Amino acid sequence: MNQDIKICVIGLGYVGLPLARLFSTKYPTVGFDMNAKRCEALMAGHDATLEVSDELLQDAIKNHNFKCTANIDDIRDCNFYVVAVPTPVDENNNPDLTPLYGASTTVGKVIKPGDIVVYESTVYPGVTEDECIPVVEKVSGLKFNEDFFAGYSPERINPGDKLHTVEKIKKVTSGSTPEIGKLVNDVYSSVITAGTHLAPTIKVAEAAKVIENSQRDINIAFVNELSKIFTLMGIDTMDVLDAASTKWNFLPFKPGLVGGHCIGVDPYYLAQCAQRHGYNPEIILAGRRMNDGMGAYVADRVIKLMLKKGIQVLGSHIIILGFTFKENCPDVRNTKVVDIVKALQEYNLNITIYDPWANPAAVRHEYGLEVVNELPANEKFDAAIAAVAHREFTDLDITTVLKPAHVIFDVKATRPAAEVDARL
């Protein structure tokens, strides 16, 4: 099989690059991305997302002829196209399929009779066959399931996780016909050591993915609400969760900010799909409202704690530890730390954001905010918000940059309760 398959992965971000690198160990593989500078950096042997180590990337380029390109002519001789582009939401939280339409147009320009295109981007059921494939048909002039075929295998990448890498996470696969489904499954199972699950249809595979993150979102929303309730009661939420976790079937979710390009986005895809079918998804949207409001909630609690301690809020200095959407990862997409910042800015105080992982230029471009990569040494702060649990913060004595009268709020509950004023 590997003598016949030549793979092209379209979109070399957190999902596409690790997958393309993995495929290159078994098949001739080309990575395609519209960002030429991104491709140049990868061919120089470094992945700025840190998902693929320099050693693995350089090995793929040197020993497996792996190539990254922004030139469409370099992918015309491929026959197995994998689309791994982002699926964000717009400012009104409506699904934005623009990247998928663009990638489908690219596929349509190069796809040939007998070729297969597999989508990995997270979508609601029906997007692959009803939205993407018609674009491929229109651009290529070929007919679906006669001239070319399709599949869907939802991405299962956990950014920053060096334990659960792409080959170690079981993969769902599907195809537009039973025969194509088996072929797609065979290709993936040849590199995914954790195994695969062949879903009966593309829509089933799409639905499976979108509910994975919606389920997690709802569970986190539940413990976020518990945190608010227990705070009003003067009870430490983490103490409650530790006690409840002694039951064998208790789900160990913790309160916190829910950002990133999956959990904080995918439920909106499922919600809109439900609404199109005449159903109003009350629980899904309630969970989203709860989680989307946690940044402002944290800011409000910090201000109240400062006032209780007699700390002047107007003109005060606050330091926020961490800005990325999760720990030990440079990804700032859809980070909810920005909600804390925006809420605090209403009080006319001074904010310093310290994050050793975030790219200051990326944060400035995306959010118009300044981030520093080193802890300020010559400034004393009135309050500190531990927003992200980077490993650099584990043994950090934040009191060295705090005034004698100060507030420490621990969003991730990674510090002992006695060392902080409050935590979620």
Image (cartoon, rainbow, N blue to C red):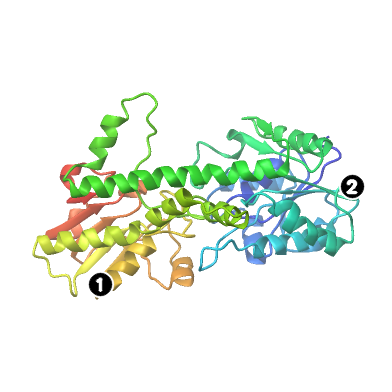
Among the two numbered marks 1 and 2 on one chain, the one whose residue lies closer to the N terminus: 2
Q: Residues within 10 Å of mark 2 (few under 14, many from 20)?
A: few
Q: How crowded is mark 1: few (under 14 residues within 10 Å), some or many (20 or more)?
A: some
Q: Calculate the distance from the C-alpha at mark 1 to the C-alpha at mark 2.
A: 60 Å
Q: Residue at x 34, y 69 (%)?
A: 342
Picture coordinates of residue 330, whole percent (x, y): 46, 55
Camera-nearest residue between 274 and 121: 274
Quadrant occupied by the N terminus: top right
Residue sitting at the far front:
278
| In contact (CB < 8 Å): disc 1 and disc 2 | no
Instruction: Answer left or right for 43 relative to 302.
Output: right
Q: Quadrant location of residue 406?
A: bottom left
Q: Which residue is drawn at 86% across and 47% down?
A: 145
Residue sitting at the far top:
248
Picture coordinates of residue 305, whole percent (x, y): 16, 59
Q: Quadrant location of residue 46?
A: bottom right
Mark carried by residue 350? 1
In the depicted structure, whether residue 97 falls above or below residue 210: below
Mark 1: which amino acid? Answer: Asn
In the depicted structure, whether residue 169 falls above or below residue 115: above
Q: Which of marks 1 and 2 is in front?
A: 2
Total marks placed: 2
Instruction: Answer left or right for 152 relative to 319.
Output: right
Q: Mark 2 points at which residue?
A: 114
Mark 2: which amino acid? Answer: Gly
Instruction: Answer left or right for 170 relative to 139.
Output: left
In the depicted structure, whether residue 132 falls above or below residue 311: above
Residue 375 at least partly seen = no
Mark carried by residue 91? none
The residue tagged with tag 2: helix, strand or loop? loop
Residue 303 at least partly seen = yes
